[in-house]
Image (cartoon, rainbow, N blue to C red):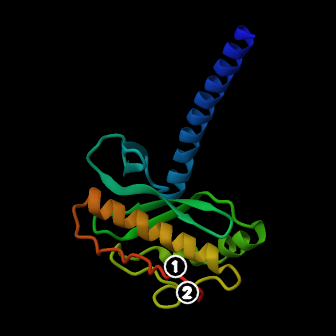
């Protein structure tokens, strides 16, 4: 029984290491989709990368942050490329659990491209400064929120820019 238990634990640990390695290498392909002209990526922290246009470290293109937000089907992870001025220059959906037909609406639309050029200090609010995709509001809102979070994280940690304070959601108790 002990040998079987030890073998089971060893198998679980090995599977975790293999899965972790595969997921970290898979992320780099999504980062290259967000910054297609990057020839070299350097990981600076847990979820932030620096993209360079050549093999040396002297031509920085942008910073790329993996940001997460909650969509209709669960967490949605986005690779957000931000240049040195705090503008979003590229996006790529790394992981999503949305309903396939709703996500296809967003993917087939020009929604991701409409977020490029936004500044980290913009509100990223559907209906006011961003037009969402009709019928896929939750997915559109999740992508916009992940873009806002990623660009602000880069602006704060990597660029040293003053990031606007995020308003806490209003909590109301009782029957609406």
Q: Are marks 1 and 2 in contact (CB under 8 Å)?
A: yes
Q: Give the labeled residue for mark 2.
A: 131
| Label 2 CA crowd tier, 10 Å (few <14, some 14–19, many 20+) | some
Residue, x 47% and y 91% (percent of image)? 128
Q: Position of residue 172 (x, y in %)?
A: 49, 82
Assess disc 1: are there few (<14), some (14-19) or many (≥20) residues with their C-alpha within 10 Å of its C-alpha. Answer: few
- The residue labelled by disc 1 is 114
- Residue nearer the viewer, 111 or 164: 164
| Residue at x-position 44% and y-position 81% | 170
- Of 140 and 112, the residue lying toward us: 140
Identify the element where label 1 is drawn: helix
Label 1 to label 2: alpha-carbon separation: 8 Å
Q: Nearer the viewer, mark 1 or mark 2?
A: 2
Q: Is residue 100 left or right of residue 70?
A: right
Q: Quadrant of the N terminus?
A: top right
| Left or right: residue 35 compared with residue 98 | left
Q: So how many labels did they put on this image?
A: 2
Q: Quadrant of the C terminus?
A: bottom right
x, y (%) of residue 9?
65, 21
The residue that appears at 63% across and 76% down in the rendered structure is: 138
Position of 158 relative to 13 (above/below): below
Q: Is residue 107 above or below residue 95?
A: below
Mark 1 or 2 closer to N-term? 1
Q: Quick one: SS at disc 2?
A: loop
Identify the residue shown where x is 56% and y is 71%: 142
């Amino acid at each position: 029984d002990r040998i079987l238990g030890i073998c089971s634990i060893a198998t679980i640990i090995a599977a975790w290491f293999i899965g972790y390695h595969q997921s970290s290498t898979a992320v780099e392909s999504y980062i290259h989709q967000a910054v297609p002209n990057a020839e070299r990526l350097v990981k600076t922290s847990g979820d932030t990368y620096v993209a360079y246009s050549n093999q040396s470290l002297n031509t920085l293109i942008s910073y790329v942050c993996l940001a997460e937000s909650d969509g209709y089907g669960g967490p949605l992870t986005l690779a957000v490329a931000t240049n040195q001025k705090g503008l979003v220059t590229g996006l790529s959906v790394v992981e999503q659990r949305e309903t396939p037909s709703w996500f296809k609406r967003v993917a087939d639309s020009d929604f991701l491209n409409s977020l490029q050029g936004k500044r980290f200090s913009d509100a990223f609010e559907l209906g006011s400064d961003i037009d969402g995709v009709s019928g896929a509001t939750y997915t559109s809102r999740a992508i916009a929120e992940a873009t806002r979070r990623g660009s602000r994280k880069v602006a704060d940690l990597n660029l040293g820019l003053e990031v606007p304070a995020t308003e806490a959601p209003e909590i109301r108790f009782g029957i609406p």
